[in-house]
Image: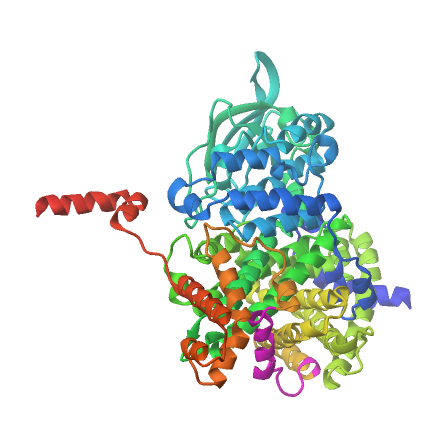
Amino acid sequence: MPTFRRNYITRPIHKWARKVLPQLSETESEALEAGEVWWEAELFSGNPDWSKLLKVKAPKLTEEEQTFLDGPCQELCGMIDDWAINEHDADLSPEVWQFMRDKKFFGMIIPKKFGGLGFSAFAHSEVVRFISTRSVAAAVTVMVPNSLGPGELLHMFGTDTQQDYWLPRLADGRELPAFGLTSDEAGSDASAMIDDGVIEMGTWQGEEVLGIRLNWAKRYITLAPVCTVLGLAFKLRDPDGHLDLGEDIGITCALIPADLPGVETGRRHIPSQTMFMNGPTTGKDVFVPLDHIIGGEEYAGRGWMMLMSALAAGRGISLPSMGCAAIALSAHTTGAYSRIRQQFGLPIGKFGGIQSRLGRLAADSYSMDAARHLTCAGLDEGRSLSVISAIMKAHATFRMREAINDAMDVHSGKAVIDGPSNYLQALYRAVPIGITVEGANIVTRSLIIFGQGSIRAHPHLLDEMKALNIEDPEESLTVFDKHFWKHVGHSTKTFFRALGRAWTGGIFAPAPDAGAVKRHYRQMARWSAAYALTADMAFLTMGGELKRKEMISGRMGDILSELYILSATLKRWENEGRQGADLPAVNYAAERGFARMRLALDEVLMNFPARWAAWLLRAVTLPGGGTPGPDDALTEKVSDLIYEPSATRNRIVGRMYSGCNRDGIVLLNECYGAVTDTAPLMKRLREADQTPDEGLERGTISQEDRDRIAKMEDLVHEVVAVDDFTREELAGLYPGLDAQVSQKEAAE
């Protein structure tokens, strides 16, 4: 039977598959090999083992890490004047730069033996998130040296000599790094970069040595204007065969001191009026010895693998942390403002239109921070989570955009008028930065999450593709036969799981003993099976064409992302002791997630090229009516979680900078406290149909009560007010304005 199966069934399938399945380019192969799969593989299996999720230890800060957050981080945020950074100085103050160096903010990921802080991924994330609640410019300045860049690459791949020299200098700020990846002619497609390095003999410190002659033109490089050492990605060529690796060696990463002849830095971009250091860099005939290649000659041509490996960790920390900070700050401020601001005699937080925004803000703040915690837990286990990092980067910043838009809508004119007291504008302007950098979200969503995730996370597909790429036809057939029939068995089981769970509403699907959220685990098992079956059918019917069906791929990526974020949400509820008061946020996130998954799957099937497969899948996975999502009653309950002060509100918004006298948050917080503190007095007056003065006169309230109400009313007036400027003040911001007015006055 094995011989018959191999020759008469597997062989024609193998022949067909070698034609239709995409051949992996070297760049794609390296990207696939970088990183590893984790919980997403369970979700992709169609039958997730929930015990594996629940066994993951919740991330915790060490005493040293907590002390750093409570001390240097608090102190740093207190030094920052975000309005001055973005509107006056176009830079952090010299005192802030020096403080960052002194306290080793640039060395969080560098091991202690090299003079760094040696922080966990969770501590790194907490620091970036905390600073982001005060200033995006400061947060980006801290995150970049600790993300994709020389420090990370040296730590992972550097030679002993490189690590011993560079890492201590990066840790204490003597050297400030930048990393040049994006080329003028190549954005997301780094393999198309035209930056060039040629191996040849040259002069270095008075001696003739074998090295690299470099020419480059990079843009969008954070810290490039002030860096002292530039990590550079370029295409390495060896036309004279010095290394015996062929002429086109491939993408390579090297360290380039910024003061070398031919290196140009200093010019700046202005990224959405967010004034962190960012700009272009060019190099013309810059020569460095071969030992400047990160990792030495051994890593010549392996730059893409190095970048993908480093990005698998950094992309899961930096921008997700900033995104979670923006969502939490939006929830914190909008909940408070909706309690303070009144219209038609009611706090606006009691209007249904506002509650719909508050509910979404509360649930997203809870869920995305849950996903951040779970991702950090995986990273702190030593995992390199390429697919999960892509999910986190894309969806933390997608939801950041949605959250800030909701916050802006609720605050209305208060958020539109810019000035020092506007705590939303800086985040609003920074949204496109988060959406675009470290892999544009359009590309990440439509190509990476499902495209890379489907191959890496599927239990058999990568093994089959590797078998098909074996040159010897018979060896290829033998290996393919083994994995193909395992795939058939898996698909058969998935088909019946998906069918049974869909038609029974998932009530018999496996789930842990999770109390009030057990039903959500069952529904996730249902959608996991539907997703896995649809993915298998897509591979079968589209083959290599699936790579070009980006709209389908994007929707499939959305389903996988929703499954991951919802897994983290349920895990958080378990980790925090099954807080009953938090259940509305968990239920809202789950019901909205299931509705989004159903919609995405429905749209996939609407556009499935093989219509017979679409009809079959629809009958198996989507029987009956739709999944409606959260109802109005649940939305109202969730909105109340951030409308009124409570332990749940504190858990939802998490750790953030409490504000200082240079922003509007400290005033908002004080006013929110006063409004909620005097709420019983105001209720007593309403029931008596009295004004505060009438209540005092008639003995309904005391003089002390009246004074508290007066203070509250003054604070409300201050919070609702917006910034305005004199002509002289505006002229300080816009010098041309003063010149125009002077010319007009002279003419008159």
Q: Which residues are magenta?
A: 620-645
Nearer the observer, 286 or 706:
706
Describe the colour scheme in one phrase. rainbow
Say whether residue 172 is visible: yes
Q: Is residue 631 magenta?
A: yes
Q: Position of residue 165 (x, y in %)?
A: 67, 25
Residue 502, placed above or below residue 186: below
As drawn, the residue found furthest toward the right would be 1
Q: Position of residue 709 (x, y in %)?
A: 47, 70
In the image, 42: left or right of 746? right
As drawn, the residue found furthest toward the bottom would be 624
Say whether residue 311 is visible: no
Q: Position of residue 699 (x, y in %)?
A: 48, 79
Nearer the observer, 17 or 585:
585
Residue 474, placed above or below residue 509: above
Q: Residue at x 65, y 51 (%)?
A: 126
Q: Residue at x 52, y 41 (%)?
A: 193
Q: Position of residue 218 (x, y in %)?
A: 48, 38
Q: Is residue 720 magenta?
A: no
As drawn, the residue found furthest toward the top would be 206
Nearer the observer, 235 or 649:
649
Q: Residue at x 80, y 82 (%)?
A: 508
Nearer the observer, 61 or 401:
61
Quadrant of the image containing the N terminus: bottom right
For residue 541, what is the image quadrant? bottom right
The count of marks equals 0
For residue 643, what is the image quadrant? bottom right
Q: Residue at x 63, y 58 (%)?
A: 392
